[in-house]
Amino acid sequence: MITAIYPGSFDPVTLGHLDIITRSAAMFDKVIIGVLNNTSKTPLFSLEERVNMLKDAVSDLDNVSVESFNGLLVDFVKQKKSNIIIRGLRALTDFDLEMQMAQGNRVVAPDVDTVFLSTSVQYSYLSSSVVKEYARYGVDLKEFVPECVISQLIDKIK
């Protein structure tokens, strides 16, 4: 059984994230979404809120689960008995940073590989930061985030 880890802060989860999750779920036996508790960032949503939103968003995918983690990603990957990290790429600028992280992870954990998936064209501009900005200005969010996230995001922004 091949398990892959899709890490991120998911503050909040977007349709772009779901695109990568859904496609990963079709490629691997099991996908664990690792929600990072990054102490160097100040997220809009708490760790618990982000985990719960993701659980709602992927409830129809039987081989996908959601967990939070602290510390190094490669340690979480090994703890979950995996050796595959999934990363989504929107643009060339993403590639540079993601490649650096993947190479660093290979130095620390030579048995862990990173699989890059390019985001579907309709989500290539989408980021959690953009979604939060749209929410602040009252833009209709249905094209950007799962339905289960919209009211929570609007409430949090207010």
Image (tube, rainbow, N blue to C red):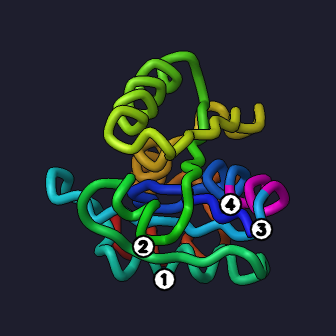
Q: Nearer the viewer, residue 115 or 149?
A: 115
| Disc 4, SS | loop
Q: What residue type is disc 3 on? A: Asp
- Residue plotted at (34% across, 65% down): 157
Give the number of callouts: 4
Residue found at the far right of this picture: 26
- The residue where tag 3 is placed is 29
Q: CA distance from mark 3 to mark 4?
A: 30 Å
| Disc 1, SS | helix
- Residue plotted at (45% across, 33% down): 102
Mark 1 vs 4, N-terminal side: 1
Residue 5 visible: yes
Q: CA distance from mark 2 to mark 3?
A: 24 Å
Q: CA distance from mark 1 to mark 4?
A: 19 Å
Question: Is residue 25 in the magenta section?
Answer: yes
Circle on res. 142:
4
- The residue where tag 2 is placed is 50
- The residue where tag 1 is placed is 52
Asked whether the beta carbons under mark 1 and mark 2 sit within 8 Å of each other, the answer is yes
The percent coordinates of residue 51 (x first, y second) are 45, 77
Q: Which residues are magenta?
A: 21-27
Closer mark to the observer between disc 1 and disc 4: 1
Above or below, 100 against 36 in this view is above
The percent coordinates of residue 60 (x first, y second) are 78, 81
Q: Quadrant of residue 24?
A: bottom right
The percent coordinates of residue 109 (x first, y second) are 39, 44
